[in-house]
Each structure stands twice: as C-alpha cells, then as structure tokens.
Image (tube, rainbow, N blue to C red):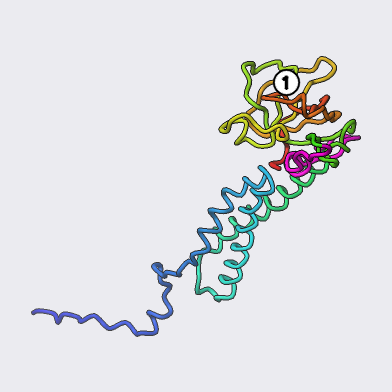
Amino acid sequence: MTSAVERPQPVPAESYRESPNEFDYRPVPVLAPVSLCLGLVAAVGMLGLLGLAVPLIGTILGAVCLVKIVRSDGEYGGFVPTVIGFGLSAFFLLFGGAYNAYAIATEVPEGYERINFNRDIAKKGFVFADGQSAPHPEVAALDGRKIFLKGYMYPQFQDHELKGFIFVKDNQQCCFGGNPALTDMISVEMQDGKTVDYSRGLVAVAGVFRVRDPRTGGELNPVYELEADHFERSRTPF
C-alpha cells in the first residue's frame, strides 16, 4: 500500500518579510571611499601650509558624507570608512596647522627681522642717480640691519664645510638657469668659523646685511652680502 506524497506547503509572504536578508545591499556614497583615501594621505599636512589643503578637503568631504549617511535612515552604507577618513583628516588638519603655525612663529632668530628675498630685495632692482646705478633706497636702508631670509644655494665645486656660498632667490636660478642677476643673489659669509654643507632645497639664513657699490659687482660677484651666523633647512616652504 503506497502512501500519499505530501505536497510542500507554501510559506506565507509574511515570513519572507520577517526573515533577515543576509544579502541585503545598501549603496555606499561615492564620497565615502574618497574621504577614506584623503584621510590616509592627510599626513602631508605636516609638510607645510600647502599640504594642509589635503586634510582640509578630506575633512569637508567627510563631514558632508557623514551627514548624508546619517540622514538616510539606513539607506546608505559606508559609515565606518567615512568616520575613519574624516577623523584622520580632521586630526592632521588641526595638528598640522598647529605645527606649521609654531614653525612660522619660531623660525626667525631673536633680534632678526623677516625679509622676503624676492619681494623686498630682488624685485627692487637698481635705480639710476646722476648717471650711475645704485641700489634701490629701500634695499640700501637694510644695510647694517640683522635680517632673516630664505632662498637657495647656488651650486659650487665644493659641497661640504663651506665657509661661504652664493645665495639666490629661487631654484630656477640655482639649478636650471644661467648666472643670476646682480639683484638676485647675495654673497653669504659664515661668521665665527662656522661652515655649512650644500643643500638643494630651500634654506634659511640670518645675519647682518651689507650693500656694496654696484660697480664692484659682476658675474657671481654679488652686490649684496650677508654676514651670517644662522643657517638651517627651511622649516616652512615659503
């Protein structure tokens, strides 16, 4: 005697709705991975004020993405990577900003005044008076004053234990261009037996500024001199 085959009973639709769907998918906003990536590279904010643009953008985009996810009431995913990216960007924005502010406030030695090589010296050029070339009055007024300025070392045959070097306003002159103009270079002489090593990057020097007669200048024979007692790699990029 054969038994009747039991037919499977249909599952009520309500059971499907009440059962959790392990394959439930929630879209992730595009800004979520972008925020995470920016957060992972936000440490460049420690390199200078220009580098702070990365954590600043990361903080803004991360905040926008977080607001979008929270307001979606569970519709969007990506909350964790967004929080990580936002947190890293915010941290390096605050910490990098504080570090750069401290570097700017403390890089000038006590008793010296900050001078911009390009704006305050090179761009002034020479003036003509009584048919002769002379330093610009504003540059001449710096003679004998203790100044702090930044620039680049002009390459020379010796790289180590330099007692003096030619100081130029930008790296195009020191690395790629020809001989710099008289107003674009300063002869730096280290004082008290100090020596320095050649550096390709931006450097900072401080000392007493001297102005010579322009008629004594010539090829790599600057009109301006600096009796330097301070030299270091620049702490900030400008």
Q: Is residue 72 left or right of residue 213?
A: left
Closest to the observer, 90 or 18: 90
The number of callouts visible is 1
Closest to the observer, 97 or 147: 147
Q: Amino acid at mark 1?
A: Val
Q: Quadrant of the C terminus?
A: top right
Which residue is outermost to the front? 131
Q: Where is residue 120, by image quadrant?
A: top right
- Residue 57 at what x, y percent from top left? 61, 58
| Image vertical order of residue 91 relative to residue 5, above or below | above
Question: Which residue sits at x=41%, y=80%?
Answer: 17
- Residue 85 at what x, y percent from top left? 58, 56
Question: Which residue sits at x=67%, y=28%?
Answer: 153
- Residue 133 at what x, y percent from top left? 78, 35
Q: What secondary structure is found at the residue carrying circle 1?
A: loop
- Residue 53 at what x, y percent from top left? 64, 54
| Image vertical order of residue 227 relative to residue 36, above or below | above
**Residue 142 in magenta?**
no
Closest to the observer, 203 or 19: 203
Question: Which residue sits at x=43%, y=79%?
Answer: 18
Label 1 crowd bin: few (<14), some (14–19), many (20+), radius 10 Å: some
Q: Which residue is mark 1?
A: 196
Give the magenta-colored segment's residue range. 107-130
